Image: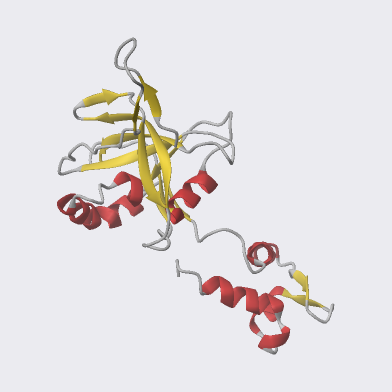
Amino acid sequence: METVLQRLKVGSPAILTGPKRFEYDKLGKSDIRLLNLLPGDWNDEICCIIFTANAHDHPPDYEAVSYTWGDPFGPRKHIRIVGTSTRSGRLSTSFLMRVSEGSFDALRRLRPSRGVVARTLWMDAVCVNQTDIAERNAQVQKMKSIFSDAQRVLVYVGEAANDSAVLIESVRDSTLARTTQTPAIVTGSNDEPTRIGDSMLHGPFVDNPMRRSLEAFLLRRWF
């Protein structure tokens, strides 16, 4: 992120100042933080609004995100907090927040497109002050209710790799086939059409691309 060029007064030398870092407000005993993920295009900066809600007092509908942070020693990326609403009041100052690569990738994938309303999420990397041990421990105790009270849970296991897109589509077809009583068909390595269940669970492993894709998928860090 580019630094802001500021001048103290006319004729003074230019001073480079780094972007402001976000500072969390204290949470009450029943409070949780939620974020509004603002719409944007794929390569746009990720922008969020953070606000505090009382978990026992009709909090707004939200989606809870289940994901992995990624490499704890890996690179960090920035998202921008463009507004906050806390017990101390509402702030519109823009802040930067450093997040893990896994958190960044999940937010980018879940972000609504331009022209769509913001998405309200609970995501631990953003909604919990990870440097405050007391808060972190208290919020961990609430995670069961945070996820059970969510409108739905979004699971982000990472970007497509090892034919995972084909695998997921096959699972969807298989699910549809069970509800419609119509067998889902895929083409195996020998170009012979087979049922989804047969393709994924039977036959020699080395000759079964769908099964190899399934194993690679289940070896992902999320599982």
Res 96 seen here: yes
What residue appears at the point 52 percent right and 45 percent down from the top-left corner?
108
What residue appears at the point 50 percent right and 70 percent down from the top-left corner?
220
Residue 98 position, x and y percent, is: 37, 46
Q: Indicate left or right for 172 with 87 as reference.
A: right
Q: Indicate left or right for 124 with 207 as reference.
A: left
Residue 193 position, x and y percent, is: 82, 76
**Quarter of the figure with residue 29:** top left
Res 55 seen here: no
**Quarter of the figure with residue 28:** top left
**Quarter of the figure with residue 53:** top left
Residue 147 position, x and y percent, is: 35, 53
Quarter that holds the C terminus:
bottom left
Quarter that holds the N terminus:
top left
Q: Residue furthest right?
A: 191
In the rendered image of this protein, does residue 185 appear above or below residue 48? below
Q: Residue furthest top?
A: 10
Residue 141 position, x and y percent, is: 21, 57
In the rendered image of this protein, does residue 140 appear above or below residue 13? below
Q: Residue furthest bottom?
A: 204
Q: Indicate left or right for 29 with 12 as reference.
A: left
Q: Indicate left or right for 195 with 50 as reference.
A: right
What residue appears at the point 70 percent right and 74 percent down from the top-left corner?
196
In the rendered image of this protein, does residue 113 appear above or below residue 74? above
Depth check, front residue: 28 or 92: 92
Colouring used for the render: secondary structure
Count of numbered badges drawn on the protein = 0
